Image: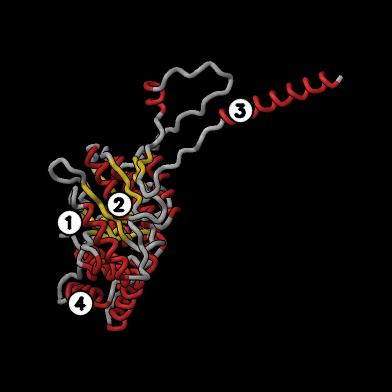
């Protein structure tokens, strides 16, 4: 009886050891990426790529999930028409108010003061308001002849005030076969990362190839958000570890763009204003390391139109830190103060190049002075 007991115990021990060995060999170690390195997020293959390049699916019962279909962004022409309609709804009160005052039978001092107040309330600014009122007074003064049409006069003067001689093209291509590099700056909360994603959609719609650099490394949400924007339109995103060196990410993004013959590299940057000296050092370093490989062709400052004077203060800080070449004005549909377009251009001496008028992915378009004024006047 004792021998049988020992035999049963021995068989049980062997079985337990064999089972433990099988479980250990079945485990897979998770390979962590090296700390401090950057990685390129490659969008998933499209349906076409999956069909032509992937090997035949194995004959199993569980179906593979379908490859995501890339979104097709709108071209600029259709964007402009839709945004013009939205702008007329949000800013039409300004134009209609001015037209109502200028169409009075008698333009007395009280009327001109009301016109000034209307322009100042719309954030046009003191100096531009005074200049505009003076021109309107001169042109609408009746001296025995037929009175000019107030609407025509107002439209012409507003277009001149907004500026028709400014170069509003966004320089998105480089020289000597290198990519254009667009540095996007601005405070957090102005819609900076969203703006980078929307600009990428504009460029993809124009059949340009794009790489995104997620150099706002201190906000994990910003990096993930940018990756989502890229995935939706098939654009690669270069990212680094959370809290890593932003300049390193920017360098790798531009290097990836150069090595792969990309048309444009868009670099999202951090927007902290608490420490002006630190921000200056960071942006300066990013620009220096980028230019070891390719010229920065554009520095776009993102401003929230609803912040009014606070936006102008932010704009001045950034213009002192980095050579801003253009302004992106977001949330213009959420403010009746369209005059911020005039004031910010006067303050910084650079043009508004893009405007955002909504939450949709294609609710951004190139800025056009004539279309803007026509929308104001309804």
Q: Secondary structure at mark 2?
A: helix
The quadrant where residue 332 appears: bottom left
Residue at the right extreme of this rendering: 1
Pointers 1 and 4 in contact (C-beta within 8 Å): no
Q: Which residue is mark 4?
A: 134
Residue at 22% from the left image edge and 41% from the top image edge: 258
Q: Which residue is mark 1?
A: 167
- State the image coordinates of residue 346 (x, y, percent, origin top left): 22, 69
Q: CA distance from mark 2 to mark 4?
A: 52 Å
The quadrant where residue 77 appears: top left
Residue at 41% from the left image edge and 22% from the top image edge: 54
N-terminal of the two: label 2 or label 1?
Answer: 1
Pointers 3 and 4 in contact (C-beta within 8 Å): no
Which is more foreground, mark 1 or mark 4?
1
Say which mark, if any, is on residue 21.
3
Q: The C terminus is located in which quarter? A: bottom left
N-terminal of the two: label 3 or label 2?
Answer: 3
Q: Which residue is mark 2?
A: 248
Q: CA distance from mark 3 to mark 1?
A: 71 Å
Question: Where is 118 relative to 83, above or below?
Answer: below
Q: Secondary structure at mark 3?
A: helix
Is residue 98 in view? Answer: no
Is residue 362 in view? Answer: yes
N-terminal of the two: label 1 or label 4?
Answer: 4
Which is more foreground, mark 2 or mark 4?
2
Badge 2 crowding class, 10 Å Cα cut-off, few under 14, some 14 to 19, many 20 or more, is some
Q: Nearer the viewer, residue 12 or 245?
A: 12
Is residue 66 shown left or right of residue 43? right
Pointers 2 and 4 in contact (C-beta within 8 Å): no
The quadrant where residue 9 appears: top right
- State the image coordinates of residue 222 (x, y, percent, origin top left): 41, 53
């Amino acid at each position: 009886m004792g021998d049988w007991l020992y035999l049963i115990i021995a068989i049980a021990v062997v079985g337990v050891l064999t089972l433990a060995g099988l479980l250990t060999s079945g485990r897979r170690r998770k390979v962590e990426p090296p700390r401090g390195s950057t990685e390129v997020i490659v969008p998933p293959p499209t349906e076409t790529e999956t069909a032509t390049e992937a090997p035949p699916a194995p004959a199993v019962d569980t179906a593979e999930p379908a490859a995501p279909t890339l979104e097709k962004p709108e071209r600029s022409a259709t964007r402009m028409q839709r945004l013009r309609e939205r702008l007329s709804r949000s800013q039409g009160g300004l134009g209609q108010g001015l037209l109502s005052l200028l169409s009075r039978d008698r333009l007395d001092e009280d009327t001109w003061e009301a016109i000034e107040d209307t322009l100042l309330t719309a954030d046009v600014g003191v100096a531009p308001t005074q200049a505009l009122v003076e021109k309107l007074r001169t042109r609408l003064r009746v001296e025995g002849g037929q009175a000019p049409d107030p609407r025509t006069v107002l439209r012409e003067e507003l277009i001149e005030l907004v500026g028709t001689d400014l170069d509003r093209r966004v320089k998105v291509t480089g020289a000597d076969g290198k990519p254009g590099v667009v540095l996007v700056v601005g405070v957090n909360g102005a819609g900076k990362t969203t703006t980078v994603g929307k600009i990428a959609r504009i460029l993809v719609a124009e059949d340009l190839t794009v790489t995104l650099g997620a150099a706002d490394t201190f906000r994990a949400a910003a990096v993930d958000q940018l990756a989502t924007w890229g995935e939706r339109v098939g654009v690669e995103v270069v990212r680094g570890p959370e809290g890593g060196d932003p300049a390193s990410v920017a360098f790798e993004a531009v290097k990836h763009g150069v090595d792969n013959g990309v048309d444009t590299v868009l670099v999202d940057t951090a927007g902290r204003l608490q420490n002006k000296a630190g921000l200056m050092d960071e942006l300066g370093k990013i620009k220096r390391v980028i230019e070891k490989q390719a010229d920065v062709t554009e520095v776009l400052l993102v401003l929230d139109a609803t912040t009014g004077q606070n936006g102008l203060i932010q704009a001045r800080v950034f213009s002192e830190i980095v050579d801003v070449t253009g302004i992106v004005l977001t949330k213009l549909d959420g403010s009746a103060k369209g005059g911020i377009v005039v004031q910010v251009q006067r303050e910084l001496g650079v043009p508004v190049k893009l405007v955002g008028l909504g939450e949709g992915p294609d609710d951004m378009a190139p800025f056009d002075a004539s279309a803007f004024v026509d929308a104001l006047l309804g």
